[in-house]
Amino acid sequence: MATWFNNQSRLVQILLLLIPVVNWVVEVLVRWSAFFKTKNIVTGLVAVLVLFFGLAFGWIDVIWCLFFKHLIFAKA
């Protein structure tokens, strides 16, 4: 899922992150798939935090995605 998200156009990424409920679902799926792919502790910690604070991470990730075309700590 992380690779799929990173391969999307920037417009599609931003649209997915702007819609509140879709934002949380995309955040959870992308972050957990990135964690299972990389087995990185930081990626796992952020994946757990997104379960509870996903909307806050989503708004930060919209800005991050505009500049870097991937989510924070989820470049798998």
Image (cartoon, rainbow, N blue to C red):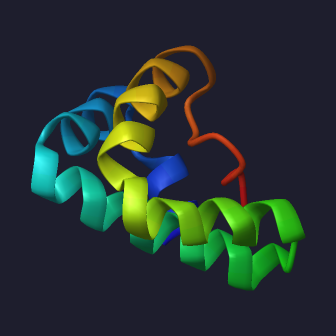
Q: Between 56 and 72, which is closer to the camera in this rendering?
A: 56
Q: Between 33 and 43, which is closer to the camera in this rendering?
A: 43
Question: In the rendered view, does 32 fall on the left or right side of 41?
Answer: left
Question: In the rendered view, does 32 fall on the left or right side of 75?
Answer: left
Q: Position of residue 49 (x, y in %)?
A: 55, 62
Q: Quadrant of the C terminus?
A: bottom right
**66 w.r.t. 41: above or below:** above
Please name the residue shown 64% across and 40% down the image. Answer: 72
Please name the residue shown 83% across and 74% down the image. Answer: 38
Please name the residue shown 47% across and 60% down the image. Answer: 50
Q: Residue furthest front?
A: 52
Instruction: Quadrant for residue 14, please give it.
Output: top left
Question: In the rendered view, does 19 fall on the left or right side of 76?
Answer: left
Q: Position of residue 28 (x, y in %)?
A: 42, 69
**73 w.r.t. 9: above or below:** below
Question: In the rendered view, does 62 fall on the left or right side of 23?
Answer: right
Q: Between 4 and 23, which is closer to the camera in this rendering?
A: 23
Count of numbered marks: 0
Q: Position of residue 70 (x, y in %)?
A: 58, 39
Instruction: Quadrant for residue 25, please give it.
Output: bottom left
Please name the residue shown 57% across and 76% down the image. Answer: 32
**39 w.r.t. 9: above or below:** below
